[in-house]
Amino acid sequence: MTLTRTLKVAVPVPLRRLFDYSVPRGMDLPAPGCRVEVEFGRRNLIGIVWEQSTQEQAAEQASQKLKPIRRVLDAAPVMDPDLMQLCQRAADYYHHPIGDVLATALPTLLRQGQDAQVSGELFWCLTPRGQHAEVDALSRAPRQQQALSLLKEHPHGLAVPMLSALSVPRSALQALEKKGWAELREMAASESSSKQLLGELPLPPGIEQEAAIRALREANGFAPYLLDGITGSGKTEVYLQAMEPLLAAGKQILVLVPEIGLTPQTVRRFEKRFNVPVESLHSGMTDRERLHGWVRSRLGEARIILGTRSAIFTPMKSPAMIIVDEAHDSSLKQQEGLRYNARDLAVWRAHMLDIPVVLGSATPSLETLYLAEQGRYRHLRLRERAGDARPPTLKIEDCRELPGHTPLSPRSLKAIADTVNQQQQVLVFLNRRGYAPVIQCHDCGWQAECERCDSFLTWHKSIGRLICHHCTHERRVPAHCPKCGSSALTDAGSGTEKIAEQLQKAFPKHPVLRIDRDTTRRKGSLDAALAKAHSGEASILVGTQMLAKGHHFARLTLAIVLDADGGFLSADFRGPEHASQLILQVAGRTGREAHRGTVIIQSRHPDNTLLHTLLSGDYATIAARLLADRRMAGLPPFGHVALLRCESMKANECIELLDQLAVLPVDPRVQLLGPVPAPLERRQGRFRFQLLLRADLRAPLHGAIGQLLHVLDRHPLARRCRWSLDVDPVDML
Ligand code: ADP
Ligand code: ZN
Ligand code: ZN
């Protein structure tokens, strides 16, 4: 009797299945979680062993048909069972190829076959050539010069976190590396075990904070919590105090934060409190650093893991709690490839690990709030601001009569003047970057449009370009109208660049600081700008949603919200929820210390009743109203939806394909709605259509998705279109 040993392997290909391989005689059977090299088509790929099987029946066919694995890369698994289970569940739930889930979950270098046995800490050091290099030689590259002289002062090298704390940009270090002057080295981690856990004393908690901390400390095994605390109520202090006994017991904590929240300030807050290694995982890291952080977490050396959404896939040796800060934030949802929501994966993972999970927010998503109301999540409330801070006052400014070219109303300007004259800070919030969203011809009405998208080109005045915000298309600003030749070109509407310019003119003595994606593109520039905002050096801040979240500016007492109406009028069913959250988050930046904050909401639809509900600043009231609307419409959380998007150079190809899917005989409990054009019907030259699937229950919805995908996988038109599936979409674009 011959036993054939076979393996099911997750291979990085876009197919929703595992592949069988045999193990050659004489080769040890690799355990699940080990990497293997396999032949796939004509390529050699690195996959992960998912299951072993030593089956007698399979022997005959298997030995004939199955290809052998070529090589085993690991003696011991690189993926732990809990992480494999999480990836499998994500693949099933999002109907996504397991191989592509691994592309999100595993560090690039691991997938490329690099050794996973790194340990110690990463240091930047000078090479012998760098030690002899002249600092003056870099006088034209001040950042590299700064980095070089710092490294000269530290002959044993500087640890990566230390360099970022010193604001040395990575780009400067990489430039030195290119010159052959500096290099990354790995050294044994410095022992810090003798230090006491607390680096600073905890703040004496308020009554509500204390109750929340007690509840979290009592958690035993899997328990989901919603920490529903208004802005400035001290949620972070609650996390810190809930973490303390777990860290004292030698355990690890995973903290997810929105992309923008992961600034040195956030990291420092955790580092200051606890003398334990903190690992921060974010998009600005090199592949090497990412692998390093991954390994340190897996070995249990990193004790607090602070990261953006993909950090939910970080392996941990002794996990004790998962915290999702700003759990409503849409950056937790990945919008391409594996369209997962890290908030939901956090709850699954906590369940698999049998540990508590905390979702913290001042404006929880309606889904989360509903689960808390149902008693599925334990609802912890912080209704008061911490310390002496009081909640801000919100006002609506009726702007129906305001001329189009004056974005700020006279009353807003007066309030800004009063505030800066009292040495307080102002935030003007507008979620639109650039100078003006459109330029047009005064004589013939021509407007500058993107050739490839259904959208106007935004004028970026300082660089003299017209840029499409939906694709990469850009061009110079024309001197004359391309249609009639007139030189009377004017702009309409305003973006942050124009607001900042107008405010600087109106308040020449008060520095205006604009913070948006355009002003913070360079590495390190966001931190530098935030430092200016924190120090109070800038009196007037103008910004997009980058400025709305999480920040604590001590002297900011006035916020002006421009163009608040868009979200409430949007076709997206989540529009009003997102708009309310954003306004309350902006409001939450004001009056966080001694002086009370004021928020002026400029509106051209001041009668909107939702806007009036917002004035109380009470998110629970507005959420209750929005939930009632959702219940009527059978939309989440009262029903479940998935979106099938399809795009093609030819509109009729999408429509035909989706039309055929829309008439498939699916479970009658599932509605197939569409096809309809996407809100942005054409992007980068492709036409975009979508089919919405809706059902009251998840099971029939997933059944119908399976049926649709089965047809799509074999449909000739599907090969000509690009299609993607989004389960629980947060954005209908
Ligand atoms: P949130 O995350 O809920 O918006 P933070 O955790 O940023 O709030 O806290 C807001 C401010 O209140 C911070 O400056 C914090 O140091 C302070 N704070 C938090 N808890 C207390 C407390 N118990 N006593 C005094 N100040 C506190
Ligand atoms: Zn013209
Ligand atoms: Zn475009």
Image (spheres, rainbow, N blue to C red):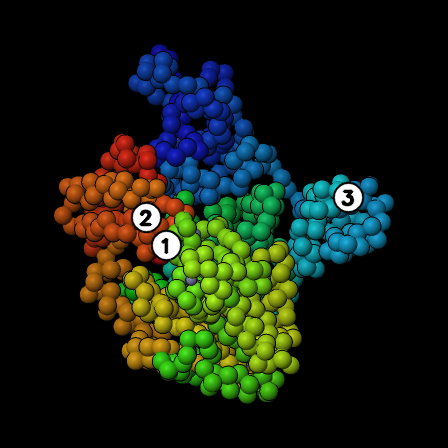
Frontmost of labels 3 and 2 is 2
Measure how far apart labels 3 and 2 are at the Cα level: 50 Å
Secondary structure of residue under mark 1: loop
The residue identified by callout 3 is 181
Q: Nearer the viewer, mark 1 or mark 2?
A: 1
Q: Is residue 648 above or below residue 575?
A: above
Residue holding disc 2:
688
| One can see residue 603 in this view | yes
Q: Secondary structure at mark 2?
A: strand
Question: Disc 1 and disc 2: Cα gap in Å?
Answer: 11 Å
Q: How far across and down, in percent of the image, does residue 1 sit?
A: 35, 11
| Residue 503, image quadrant | bottom right
Q: Are marks 1 and 2 in contact (CB under 8 Å)?
A: no
Q: Nearer the viewer, residue 155 or 445?
A: 445
Q: Amino acid at mark 3?
A: Trp
Q: Position of residue 130 (x, y in %)?
A: 80, 44
